Image (cartoon, helix red, strand yellow):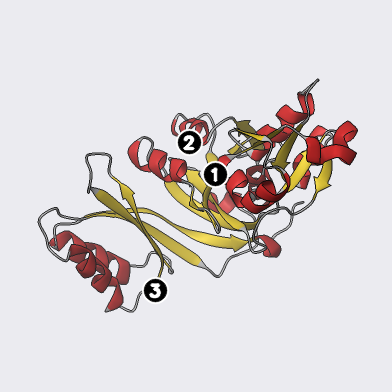
Amino acid sequence: MVTVAFLGPKGSFTEAAAKRLLPEGNLRPFTTIPDCIDAVKENVVDCAVVPLENAIEGSVNITLDYLIHHQRLEMAAEITAPIRQNLLVQDRYLSEWKNITTVYSHPQAIAQCHQFIRKHLSHAEISYTSSTAEAAKYVSEIKEGMAAAIANDISAKEYGLKVAEAEINDYENNSTRFIVLRNGNFNADTSLTQKPSDQYKTTLMVTLPSDFSGALHQVLSAFAWRKINLSKIESRPMKTGLGNYFFIIDVDMVLDKVLIPGVCEELKALGCGVEILGSYPCYHWETLSIK
């Protein structure tokens, strides 16, 4: 049985995504995203499921940066999941949740619920946790003090909390991309859900030559004249000094034997560094189910 690391504890959005993608997997929670990635690299688990990008708050930078700068793994699959945040409290505070003094959650979840917090809980202190499920777990264990967590309804059931207010995120169309990261001989094709996907992505990392004017334009042209569609391009600092960046580019096609290799060779001829981070199937939440 494949072992799967996920950003825990139990009840997290990441656990739910892992169950959808790897329904036969033996899931193991880890405290942080780097811990999940390290576990794969050190062969403690076969793969990891971690958040990559949120529709409202953008990329999960710790995932990208740790993957690029510390532990290089292969992207093996992704799933896009709806995100619905709820205000969770202990049962004894359900009727007086507007008087809570501290709100616990992950920084992105706090940002996703900014308007709700501003309107109803502007007096409360904000305390950040490593995940929304960690916030729910912590609030469930508090003996004294009026506290609430922002998390999903799965966390509420897992830790015996009540939903004081449901779907408090500022935008209805909130979703997160979760990515499966693998290392070595793990075969994602036989371990993933048996439902095939008709959508694939290939993700590349590109670094530009420092002395080449118009290099980014040339990079994009290499894709454009081949009529290759890009679903995303993002810059991240190389951490070698101001103004030094690498680019993460998502291509809406599977890695083939002609077009993408041709792009890579053209970019290398321009003096760019090119690395393929993975070519993988993409799934959507509503097309999969938990066994």
Q: Is residue 267 above or below residue 168?
A: below
* Mark 2: few/some/many CA within 10 Å (<14, 14-19, 20+): many
Work out whether mark 2 precedes mark 1 in sequence or the reverse, and give the earlier one: 2
**Kind of residue at disc 3:** Asn
- Amino acid under disc 2: Ile
The residue at the far front in this view is 123
Closer-to-camera residue (195/88): 88
How far is disc 3 from disc 1 in space, using C-alphas? 25 Å
Looking at the image, residue 68 sits to the left or right of residue 179; the answer is: left
Q: Quadrant of residue 136?
A: top right
Of residues 225 and 115, the one nearer the viewer is 115
Mark 2–mark 1 CB contact (< 8 Å):
yes
Image vertical order of residue 43 relative to residue 56, above or below: above
Q: Amino acid at mark 1?
A: Val
Compute the Cα span from label 2 to label 1. 8 Å
Q: Check disc 3 and report the residue beneath it.
A: 229
Residue at x-position 75% and y-position 44%: 87
Residue in view at x 43 percent, y 66 percent: 254
In the current view of this chain or complex, which residue is farthest to the top?
Answer: 143
The residue carrying pointer 1 sits among few (fewer than 14), some (14 to 19) or many (20 or more) residues within 10 Å by Cα, namely many
Q: Which residue is mark 2?
A: 37
According to the picture, the residue beneath numbered tag 1 turns out to be 50
Q: Quadrant of the N terminus?
A: top right
